[in-house]
Image (tube, rainbow, N blue to C red):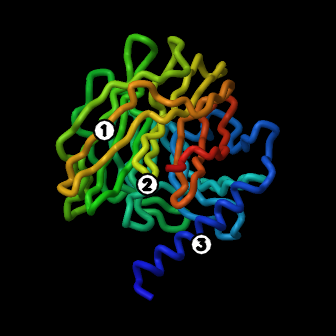
Amino acid sequence: MKLSTLRHTVRIVAAAALLTVLGTAPAGAADGWQKVGSDARSGVSGLAYEGPAADGRGVSTLIVHDNKATGQPRLSRLIHRESGPDDVTPMTWTGAEPSDLEAIEAIPGMPGEYLALAARGIVYRLRVSGRTATVADYAPLPAIGRGDDYESFALVSRSGSLIALWADRGAGADRPATLYSAPLTFARWGQPQFGTVTRRAYRAPYPTGGETRHISDISVPDSGRILVSSAADAGDDGPFDSAVTDAGRVTVSSTGQVRITLAASATLLGRFPGYKIEAVECVPGSAQALLGTDDENVGGHVRTMPYCAS
C-alpha cells in the first residue's frame, strides 16, 4: 500500500472513531456545555486541535488564556469529552512571555508546532513537547490597522501554499470587523513571514448590539468554508451573547493566489445566549466544531456542534 493511501486510511479510521466519541455520548451539561474554568484567568480565548485523547475518550486540544500579568497561565491542555468531565492541565511557557493571547492554530505539516496570536498583533511560533511550549520565534502581523484588536487566527494549506487568516474583531455598528488574509512562509531561522495582504469588511448578522465583536474567531475546514464566531460582551459579569455563522469561502489557486469571498448574507448556524464564544476549531476529518468560551468572571466552557461539514 502506498504511504499516501495508508495515511488517508488512518485518517478516515481516526475520524470515524472520533465521530463516535463526539456524536453518541450524552452531553455533560443540560445545554451541552462543559465547564473548563472557574474565573477570569481560566477562560478559553483560543483553541487548537492536537489529536484524539490518549485514553481514546474525546479529543486533546491546546487552549490559550488572555492573561496579561507576569506568571499568569498562558496555555493549557484540554481533554474534552462529551460525557465529561473535561480535564485541564496548565502548560509551562518558555521564552518571551506574551500579553493577552487570543488565538492559537496548529501549523499544517509541522507536528507539535503552533502559532499563537496576541491581541495587539504579535504572532508567536511555538514548539510543544509534553507539558512545555517553547517560543521558537515571533513576529508582528503585517498591515496592522489603527485601533485593531485581534481575537482570531486560522491557517489554510492548499496546493503546497500556506495561507493565514485573521481579523480585527470590530466593535458595534460603527466598526465592522476587518478580515485579513496573506500567504505565510517561514524564514530559515523560524520566523513567520507574511506576503501580500488582502482585506474584507464583515458585519455579524447576530449579535447586533453596541457591544458586538463581529469576529471573535475563525476556522476553515477542508471545504474552504469560513466559519466565524461573533460575541457580545457587556462587561466582566456579562450578560454575554454569541453566534457562529458560515461567512463565506477561501480559495487558493495553483500559483498560491488567495481569494476571500464573503457571502452577501452570512448563514447563521447557531445562537448561544449567555456565553461568549472566542474559539472555533473544526476537528480534521469530521463535521464537528469545538466551541470555547471566555465568560470572564464565570470562567470558560467547551462544547461541540456539527458545523464543519462541506
What numbered label is drawn on residue 260? 1
Q: Residue at x 78, y 55 (%)?
A: 25
Q: Is residue 146 left or right of residue 149?
A: left
Of labels 2 and 1, earlier in sequence is 2
Q: Is residue 249 left or right of residue 144?
A: right
Residue that numbered label 2 is attached to: 222
Circle 3 SS class: helix
Q: Residue at x 53, y 48 (%)?
A: 308
Q: Is residue 146 left or right of residue 48?
A: left
Residue 93 spot, x, y in % from top left = 48, 54
- Density class for disc 2 (Cα within 10 Å; few <14, some 14-19, many ≥20) is some
Disc 2 residue type (three-letter): Asp
What numbered label is drawn on residue 13? 3
- Density class for disc 3 (Cα within 10 Å; few <14, some 14-19, many ≥20) is few
Of labels 1 and 3, earlier in sequence is 3
Disc 3 residue type (three-letter): Val
Residue 273 spot, x, y in % from top left = 67, 25
Disc 1 residue type (three-letter): Ile
Residue 1 spot, x, y in % from top left = 45, 88
Give the spatial CA distance, label 3 vs label 2: 17 Å
Q: Quadrant of residue 189?
A: bottom left
- Density class for disc 1 (Cα within 10 Å; few <14, some 14-19, many ≥20) is many
In this rendering, does residue 101 appear at all? no
